[in-house]
Image (spheres, rainbow, N blue to C red):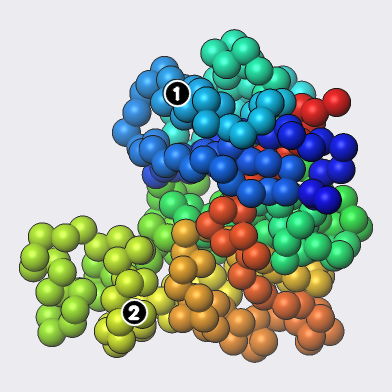
């Protein structure tokens, strides 16, 4: 039996839209991804981005093994779920866009949308690392930092459905300007995201000319979070130090979340999960040192069961729950 009883032979399309790339796939009731697509999302105008997403969905529909009942989108921004409008989107040109209606018009299929962090939380809470927990947090570490919150056995979306933008918690007053279209400063994602790993790696390469990072710069490669992680896994000490630094900054935010929400689990998803304990180990050490003792003792900080697929599978779960009647 699949994870969605009475939906046999049906499938949905899940789309995980990120600030750098979009992932899509045809997903069956057992959460098996039957056709997987990836396209760049960065640097596109609004209409171009919507067209790319529609093209991905159509290709996934054509490859789907059964009847497609709907499409779920995880979008990296503040959504008004009452209207289907993207209220704010720091990394993509979607602010003010009637995303749900426009995609439904393009596709001719039922469409459901939610914040990408909420989608990842939904997948892990229903089927993955947060299953069985009444109080859990999702932290997606990619281009920025997204989040999802389960409290008292309910997924919290806030008054308009716009939560939980935890990456925009202020951790340094008057700190560096946030990236993209966000007007704030000193936000957590500036210090602890995948982009932050790339920035810290570039700085480390300048100060450690004998490192593998410096050699990559000399060879003309851009220092990204993925490259730092790759070099760290191959034993480059400078890259390991970069991940430890960003991991401690990640832990700084975890401390606040632990003290506020008292979760049983913090589930970490997104591309940066590939760093594993090189990133999460230092984060756990900060939580153990700085969080309130009675709260830190009950929390587990663990990688997502579905890894970087959590957002895609969460978008599919959303579609099964909201598009299939």
Q: Classify mark 2: helix, strand or loop.
A: helix
Q: Nearer the viewer, mark 2 or mark 1?
A: 1
Residue 273, x across and y down, in percent: 51, 67
Tell which of 149 and 189 is nearer to you. 149
In the rendered image, residue 139, in percent from the top left (x then y), is placed at 62, 60
**Residue closest to the eye, 68 or 56:** 68
Asked if residue 42 shows in the view, the reply is yes
* Quarter of image, res 105: top right
Q: Residue at x 52, y 31 (%)?
A: 63
Image coordinates of residue 248 in percent, x first then y, are 51, 78
Name the residue rendered at 80%, 69% in the picture. Answer: 263
| Residue 259 drawn above or below residue 164 | below
Q: Is residue 199 visible?
A: no
Dot 2 or dot 1, earlier in sequence: 1
Q: Is residue 94 above or below residue 130?
A: above
| Residue 302: image location, x then y, percent | 65, 73
Work out which quarter of the rendered image holds the C terminus and state it. Answer: top right
Numbered tag placed on residue 224 in the rendering: none
Q: Secondary structure at mark 1?
A: helix
Using residue 164 as the reference point, say whether residue 131 is left or right of it: right
Q: Quadrant of residue 269?
A: bottom right
Residue furthest to the right in view is: 152
What residue does disc 1 label? 55
Q: Which residue is mark 2?
A: 232
Task: Say if 228 sits above or below 28 in the image.
Answer: below
Q: Separation of disc 2 and disc 1 at Cα?
A: 36 Å
Q: How many marks?
A: 2
């Amino acid at each position: 039996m699949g994870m969605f009883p009475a939906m046999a032979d049906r499938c949905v399309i899940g789309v995980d839209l990120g600030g750098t790339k979009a992932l899509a796939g045809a997903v069956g009731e057992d959460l098996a991804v039957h056709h997987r697509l990836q396209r760049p999302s960065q640097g596109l105008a609004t209409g171009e981005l919507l067209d790319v997403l529609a093209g991905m969905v159509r290709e996934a529909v054509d490859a789907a093994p059964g009847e497609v009942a709907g499409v779920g989108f995880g979008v990296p921004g503040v959504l008004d779920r009452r209207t289907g409008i993207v209220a704010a989107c720091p990394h993509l040109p979607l602010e003010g866009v009637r995303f749900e209606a426009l995609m439904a018009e393009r596709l001719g299929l039922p469409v459901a949308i939610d914040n990408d962090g909420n989608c990842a939380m939904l997948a892990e809470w229903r089927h993955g690392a947060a299953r069985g927990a009444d109080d859990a947090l999702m932290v997606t570490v990619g281009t920025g930092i997204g989040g999802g919150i389960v409290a008292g056995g309910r997924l919290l979306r806030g008054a308009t459905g716009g939560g939980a933008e935890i990456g925009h918690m202020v951790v340094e007053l008057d700190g560096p300007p946030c990236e993209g279209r966000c007007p704030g400063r000193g936000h957590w994602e500036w210090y602890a995201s995948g982009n932050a790993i790339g920035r810290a790696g570039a700085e480390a390469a300048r100060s450690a000319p004998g490192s593998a990072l410096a050699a990559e710069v000399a060879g003309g490669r851009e220092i990204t979070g993925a490259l730092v992680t790759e070099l760290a896994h191959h034993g480059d000490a400078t890259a390991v130090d970069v991940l430890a630094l960003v991991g401690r900054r990640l832990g700084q935010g975890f401390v606040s979340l632990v003290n506020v929400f008292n979760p049983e689990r913090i589930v970490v998803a997104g591309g940066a999960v590939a760093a594993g304990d090189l990133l999460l180990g230092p984060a756990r050490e900060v939580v153990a040192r700085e969080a309130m003792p009675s709260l830190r003792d009950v929390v587990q900080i663990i990688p997502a069961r579905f890894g970087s697929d959590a957002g895609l599978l969460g978008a599919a779960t959303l579609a099964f729950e909201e598009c299939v009647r």
